[in-house]
Image (tube, grey):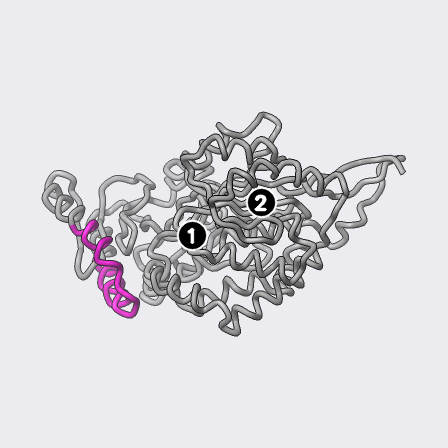
Amino acid sequence: MILYQGTVYDDSKQKELIQSLKEDCYQTLSLMKKIEAKDVIEACDQIAKKVRNGDYNETILPSLATLDIPFEQFEHYISMFEKDALEKKVKTELGEDYQNLSDIEDSKRKIMPLGILFHIAAGNVDALPAYSVVEGLLAGNINILKLPSGDNGLSVQLLKELIDIEPKLKDFIYVFDVPSTEIETLKIFAGMSDGIVVWGGDAAVSAARQMAPIDAKVIAWGHKLSFAYATPDAKDEDLAGLAHHICETNQLLCSSCQGIFVDTDDRKALDLFAKRFFDIFLKVSKEHKQVSIGMRGKNTITLYFENLESHQSHKTIFHQDGVSVIACDDQKLELSMLFRNVWVKRLNRNEIVKVVKPHKNHLQTAGLLCGQNDVFDLTGKLLQAGLIRITKPKDMARFYVGETHDGTYALREYTKIVEFID
């Protein structure tokens, strides 16, 4: 499905439309057409109200059920599109008085959009592709969106609705359902863009850099690793909060907990902690929708072989009803098996920087489980190691208006400051 200047086309029109895309985008720039953030915000706010009223339930509810996302959590995503949130976002990221920059000597200054943004979206959050375009619109850019594989039509539906509400946006939104294997087509999009916004893992970011011309800015929102850090005496309440977080996200988000580092050198203490967390985790998991049979089957096979090798690997494995906690001897920060399978490893607080820092730009969130007296020390060490967010365990995946994307503001990445004579 293609969205081109406000009209939805079948994919059979792709070649024809791509041939005219550059000329149409350049025409918008030549005519100095502009969009105001306030118009984008008003249109988004109307859509958010429609979502809350259930207008898109036919598309949204099946996706929420498939991903086991509670509607309360989805309502939090909706709030990102509401007027108050977007107004706060613009002021936070660009400044309270961003439209009136002070002069430098005899030169005027102002913030302008980069021009044309090419968004390569990931598919681990349903509203993400549309939200990425909204961020580009708030900065005033023309936006070309490559849909992620498996997109259920929600992105086109939301963006088409946005144009219907505010027709001025039609020349600033283009959506194509192009497979990642069509490299030459993607190079066309990249070649005409001032910025390439890529969401995804190292392979996606690397591919984007390879196709990007030397004069295009690559803005990478890459996959990140997040984990929990706990003292052995962490409260059961915090462990339950962490378990709920893991079940709600199924460890699929950049902010999802993959495993737990425990502040100890004692292997016996590690195993006791792992068993205590497993018992809580198993109980909490039963309050959530079960993981799909396919994923449970895959992980069951993996765990079977882990058990066979446990006498050599020195791993202690707790496994039942699709939930597992594996206590390991190593200190490697790594992706888990996902879908409610967690590793637990020893990491003395004095070794946090040495072990975690080498992962630098892959780090995002740490959920902290400790007493109040340890918060300052452990937070400092985790931040020095390169973590960007330190949260309560239950809040690892929460998003607040005004937060950064991985340590930087998107709207600043999508704009530039120009100087000119009056």
Q: Quadrant of the C terminus?
A: top right
81 falls in the magenta region: no
Q: Position of residue 107 (x, y in %)?
A: 86, 36
Which of 324 and 218 lies nearest the eye of the viewer?
218
Q: Please, what is the three-letter code of the amino acid marked with disc 2? A: Thr
Give left or right: position of 55 versus 241: right
Find the residue positioned furthest to the bottom: 53
The residue at which mark 1 appears reads as 151
Which of 365 and 176 lies nearest the eye of the viewer?
176
280 falls in the magenta region: yes
Q: Which contiguous range is marked in magenta?
A: 275-300
The residue at which mark 2 appears reads as 408
Q: Position of residue 198 (x, y in %)?
A: 50, 40
Residue appearing at x 77%, y 53% in the figure: 97
Residue appearing at x 61%, y 33% in the figure: 192
Using a 10 Å C-alpha cutoff, classify the residue at mark 1 as few (fewer than 14 neighbours), some (14 to 19) or many (20 or more). Answer: some
Residue appearing at x 25%, y 58% in the figure: 292
Q: Would residue 373 be seen by someone viewing this image from the given angle?
A: no
Q: Position of residue 311 (x, y in %)?
A: 10, 42
Q: Secondary structure at mark 2?
A: loop
Res. 356 image quadrant: top left
Q: Please, what is the three-letter code of the amino acid marked with disc 1? A: Asp
Which of 399 and 387 lies nearest the eye of the viewer?
399
**Mark in front: 1 vs 2:** 1
Find the residue positioned furthest to the top: 214
Mark 1 and mark 2 lie on one chain; the one further toward the N terminus is 1
Using a 10 Å C-alpha cutoff, classify the residue at mark 2 as few (fewer than 14 neighbours), some (14 to 19) or many (20 or more). Answer: few
